Amino acid sequence: MYATNVRNLKRNPSEALRHAEQEPVLILKGNQPNAIILNLKSSLGDMDEQLKPALAASLFKDRVLSLGAAAQISGLSLSEFIDHLTQLDIDLVVADRQTPKELETLDSWLS
């Protein structure tokens, strides 16, 4: 699935429309999935398999689903789904309050 942000869509909407002839186009707003452009000549049944990864990526990014659950919904293998997330610039791991302490512990073990 091709992904672009709002700024690029404003600059060159015809590029997104060209890509939409081949596959759905995911529009990102502030690096968050925001909308999808579909070509009306394609049937929605054909789009089903292409929309699942976009929906799963959005649910994973919002921490509604775990990585494994999102991969299952996407219809992709885990490694393919991780590649998909990487293409969309979605982090697999998000630091929390415990992360600095864990990094200190890891540094002490490695030194």
Image (cartoon, rainbow, N blue to C red):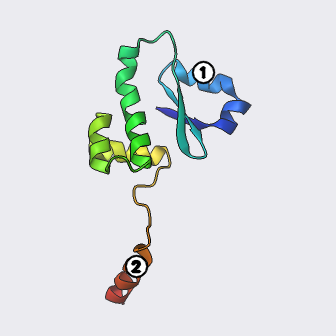
Q: Amino acid at mark 2?
A: Leu
Q: Residue furthest right?
A: 11
Residue pictured at 37% horizontal, 38% vertical: 56
Q: Which residue is mark 1?
A: 17
Frontmost of labels 1 and 2 is 2
Q: Looking at the picture, does residue 21 appear above or below residue 41?
A: below
Q: Which mark is residue 103?
A: 2
- Residue type pointed to by label 1: Leu
Q: Is residue 96 above or below residue 61?
A: below
> How far across and down, in percent of the image, does residue 79 sit?
30, 47
The image shows residue 53 at horizontal and vertical percentages of 38, 35
Answer with mark 1 or mark 2, whichever residue precedes in sequence.
Answer: 1
- Which residue ends up furthest to the top in the rendered image? 41
Q: Is residue 23 above or below residue 79?
A: above
What residue is drawn where x is 51% and y is 20%? 38
| Element class at badge 1 | helix
Q: In the visual, does 29 lie left or right of 59? A: right
User: How far across and how far down the image is residue 90, in percent?
Assistant: 47, 50
Q: How many labels were placed on the picture?
A: 2
